Amino acid sequence: MADIDSGSGRATPRKRADARRNEATLLDAAASAFVASGVDVPVRDIAARAGVGVGTIYRHFPTRADLIVAVYRHQVEACAEAGPALLADSGTAHAALAQWINLFVDFLVTKHGLAEALQSDDAAFATLHAYFLDRLVPVCAQLLDAAATAGEIRPDVTAFELLRGVGNLCVGAGEPRYDARRLVELLIVGLRHGAPAGPR
Amino acid sequence: MADIDSGSGRATPRKRADARRNEATLLDAAASAFVASGVDVPVRDIAARAGVGVGTIYRHFPTRADLIVAVYRHQVEACAEAGPALLADSGTAHAALAQWINLFVDFLVTKHGLAEALQSDDAAFATLHAYFLDRLVPVCAQLLDAAATAGEIRPDVTAFELLRGVGNLCVGAGEPRYDARRLVELLIVGLRHGAPAGPR
DNA sequence: GAACTATACGGAACAGCGTTCCGTTTACCA
DNA sequence: TGGTAAACGGAACGCTGTTCCGTATAGTTC
């Protein structure tokens, strides 16, 4: 999948061959370990799977969050880029928003433990938090603004809040009696119908 | 607040005085430790606060979840008992449901880390899970049934699912940019307006 | 009041985690 | 074919929850 950090950067004098190889190996090992045991799989397990020492993991990925981000970067980027496309293609802004949220939920519920990690306030996950928010909040805000401008939804819910809420609802997906998708759907429906002042 | 385990039980020959004293001391210490540092405060901190050894904690409360349950039992009972009362007093079943959910949310958001613990799949929290579900699911189901029978809400959301969703939304409450109550409100609104088949 | 015993206590010890650190190995370049 | 900076492996550290057992003590019995 193309070489990592070859050419371009003159300032960084190019990493050693074994280092580049290990980084790729680690990404693969982490990805399969995440699938097998969730994103909270012990670091030692990932190291063993990759056939390296734990020190090697931390040299390449200073914190566990960096590893998670690296593994899922492609999919998060794809989700972010789908936002404007949906807005252009969908009949209404609300429909685009609903579809985009569905993409996000599909992504989250298929990654065991990712939703849990996303809303952990553990300092180790700060960069994970930051990456998801930096990348997705603007996209969500654009969809939200469009729907609000069109008068299709109540205008007082922020993109941060909605993403966080949806992420929270995805925690525990996979349990048979709990359908996160349905509850997220309820949330989106409520967004359309809820009066700004609320009941009572 | 009455004595603990006095009289009645002949089978249990009554605990020693120091044991009963320590149990009460531990409940107080745990309660204030939970307020100060969240329900995930280290066991050693609670022990230190109570002036006992960690062994004493585990003798009285075999698992951390038992301690949490013991500390919050009164409030959970109160919440459970409020359900039928609200149903009798409110104009509509949906209003009763909304108010009861509000009680639950108020309880959760004021207990740092409790919502997080509730949806943890850690085996240590199994009894915590079980207690909350045993006590609250039937109440929620009663409210839900009443509202569904009255045709005020879509009938395909289970009490378990709703409680879990609401609990999930309460995770991270306390963060300034995240208003769990508002999102729960959206969920309840969606419950009223959502068509069983959903959009699209 | 003294002796005896079941009960309860305290905290050292264990296991599992993330993370750090450093002696050793290895890839690259001259 | 050395020499050296880069990278590696895994022991070690600090922090968890939990267990275990020698010691202290409350309650009972004479």
Image (cartoon, coloured by chain):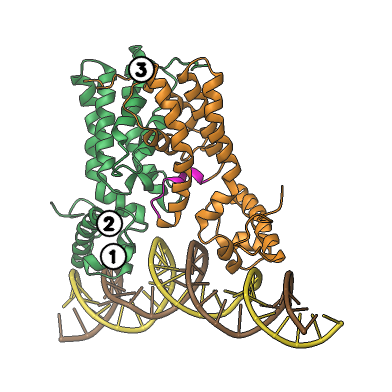
Chain colours: A green, B orange, C yellow, D brown
The residue sitting at 46% across, 19% down in the picture is B93
- Secondary structure at numbered mark 2: helix
Amino acid type shown at disc 2? Ser
Magenta residues, as a range? B113-122
Q: Could you say which disc has been placed on residue B183 in the image?
A: none
As for residue B121 lying within the magenta part, the answer is yes
| C20 over B100 or under it: above or below | below
- Secondary structure at numbered mark 3: helix
Q: Could you say which disc has been placed on residue A45 in the image?
A: 1
As for residue B35 lying within the magenta part, the answer is no
The residue sitting at 54% across, 44% down in the picture is B112
> Quick check: do tags 1 and 3 share a chain?
no
- The local crowd at label 1, few if under 14, some if 14 to 19, many if 20 or more residues have their Cα within 10 Å, is some
| B72 over B197 or under it: above or below | below
Amino acid type shown at disc 1? Asp
Residue situated in front as seen by the camera: B42 or B139: B139
Res A193 quadrant in image: top left
The nearer-to-camera label among 2 and 1 is 2
The CA distance from mark 1 to mark 3 is 47 Å
Residue situated in front as seen by the camera: B58 or B116: B58
Residue situated in front as seen by the camera: A12 or B140: B140
> Quick check: do tags 2 and 1 share a chain?
yes
Residue ID for mark 3 = B193
Q: Where is residue B79 in the image (x, y as percent from the top left)?
A: 55, 35
| Residues at discs 2 and 1 in contact (Cβ within 8 Å) | yes
Q: Could you say which disc has been placed on residue A37 in the image?
A: 2
- Secondary structure at numbered mark 1: helix
The CA distance from mark 3 to mark 2 is 38 Å
